[in-house]
Amino acid sequence: MNLTVYNTLTRRKQKLKTVHPGEVRMYSCGPTVYSRAHMGNMRAYLFMDTLRRVVTFDGYKLIGVMNITDVGHLTSDADDGEDKMQKAAEKTGKSPWEIAEHFTSLFLADIDKLNIGRPEIIAKATDHIEDMLEFVEALVEKGYGYETSDGIYFDISKFPSYGKLSGNARLNDNIAGARVDVNEEKRNPADFALWKKAPKEHIMQWDSPWGRSYPGWHIECSAMSRKYLGDTFDIHTGGVDHIPIHHENEIAQSEALLGHPAVSYWMHVEFMQVDGRKMSKSLGNTYTLDELAQRGYSPMDFRYFCLNTHYRKKLNFTFEGMDSAKIAYSRLLSLLCACKNSSEKGDPEIIGEFKKKFTEAVNDDLNIPLGMGALWTLLKNPPSRGIYDAAIWADAVLGLSLDKCEVAEDIPDDIKSLAEERWAARLAKDWAKSDALRNQLASLGWAVKDGKEGYELKKL
Ligand code: AMP
Ligand code: ZN
C-alpha cells in the first residue's frame, strides 16, 4: 500500500519512502514525567499509536522510540525558568527520581488502558547522560556551541536554515521581543541551551567538562533518536506546540552534527482544546483518565472520541462530545455483536468494497474518520459474520477492542426506547409490531425476555 503522510517540513502530503526498505524507524517525543498526563497529551499518543498501527497494517517492520523526559525540561520551552522535575521535587519533598518513577508508571498504565501500543524502545533521559554529553562536546568542537556563565549554548547564526520547520524567518526578533529577560551572554536571542550548569541546590547533576551540570531538554531527543535509529530515520512525531522551538532545536543540533538532515518526515498532531484554548496543565483545564472514569466514560469511549477527528484538526473536548462518542461506541459494539452471532456469511462484494475503502482512507494521511465512516456504512447491511470479521480486521488500525461484545454495562438509550415501544405494542396486543421490534433489537445485539410485569434486556 502507498502510505502518504503530511510532512510539516515540506508543508504537503508525501508518499512514504523509508530509508530501509520494508522498515519504518520512528521517534516520538514522550512525556515529561513531573505530573499525571492529561487527555490532551493522550491525544498526541493516540496519534502516535494510529501511525504505528497503520504502518504495521501496511506490512512494515516498525522500530519506534519514545523518550521519557525525567530531567532538563524547563518550565518554559525556551530555557527560561526552573527544571520541571526539580520544581516538582521541591513542592512534594520527594526526590526527582521518585517523582519520575511514579508518573512514568502511571503514564504506561494509562496508555495501556487506551490500547496505545508501547514503542519498541522507551528511553529515559537520565539513562543517556553520556550520549547527550558526547553529542554536545562534538557540537562545541565543531564550533556550534559556546560557553556562558550558566551553560553551553547553540549558536544559531552558524546554522543558516534555523527556523525551516516553522518557516519562522523572524524567529530571533520574535523571541527577543517576547521575553523580558534576554540573556545578555547569548550571541543571538534564539540561541538555546545544550547543557546547563547546575546551581548547588539543583538535585539532578552530573560531572562534565564544564563542572557539575545537567542536560538541556532538546539534546535528549537528538541524542537518543540517533543512538537507536541511526543518522537518518523516517518519521519524527510530536504535538504542534513542539514545531517552533523544540523541533527547530532538534533539527539544528542533529543537522549541525551530521552535516545532513536526520529525519525524512515530521508529523505533528493538533491540539485538544477546551473552550477554544489548548488543554494544558498551566491553564488548569485538564482531565485525566481517572476523572473521565469517575464521570462514567471508559478509555475506549475517549479513544472513539479522538478517532472521530483527523489528527491535523483541532479537537474540542466537551462532555456532549464524549456522550455521543460513548453512545456511538456502545452501538458499534451492539451491532457487531449481532454480526458475531449471525450464521450469515455476508456479501463478499460489499465486504471487499469496505476493505478497499478503509485501506485507502487510512493510508491517506491517516484518515481514520473516513475509515470509520466506511465501517458504519458497512453496518447498514444485514448482520453477518463476514461483517464482524471485516470489522476485526479494521480494528488492527482502530484499536477499539471491537471483539468485546459484552462491554456495554449500561443499556444505551436507543435500545431502551425500542424495548419500551415493543412493550407498549405487546400490551396493545399488536403482535406483528412487537415481533418486528424484537427482531430489530436482536439485530442490534439485544434479546428481550418477557415477564409478567415487564421485560428484561440481555446482551446477545
Ligand atoms: P509534555 O509532557 O508537555 O512534553 O507533552 C507531551 C506530548 O503531549 C507532546 O507531544 C505535546 O505536544 C502533547 N500535548 C500537550 N498538550 C496537548 C494538547 N492539548 N493536545 C494535543 N497534544 C498535546
Ligand atoms: Zn523531543
Image (cartoon, rainbow, N blue to C red):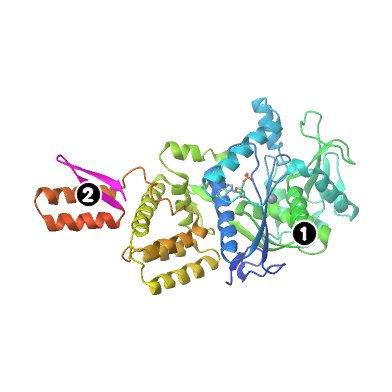
Point out residue 409 in the picture as x, y percentages from the top left corner.
Answer: 36, 42
Disc 1 marks which residue?
Answer: 230
Q: Residue at x 65, y 47 (%)?
A: 30
325 or 446: which is nearer to us? 446
Q: Decide if residue 174 is in sight here.
A: no
Q: Mark 1 or mark 2, which has the lower sequence index?
A: 1
Dividing the picture into quarters, in which one does residue 196 lie?
A: top right
Magenta stretch bounds: 446-460
Q: Amino acid at mark 1?
A: Gly
Which residue shows up at 22% across the image and 46% down it? 449
Main secondary structure of the magenta stretch = strand
Tag 1's secondary structure? loop
Determine if the magenta segment contains residue 361: no
SS label for mark 2: helix
Please tell me whether mark 1 or mark 2 is closer to you in this view.
2
Count every numbered label the image shows and give the total.
Answer: 2
The percent position of residue 352, horizontal first and vertical second, equals 43, 72
Q: Which mark is residue 282?
A: none
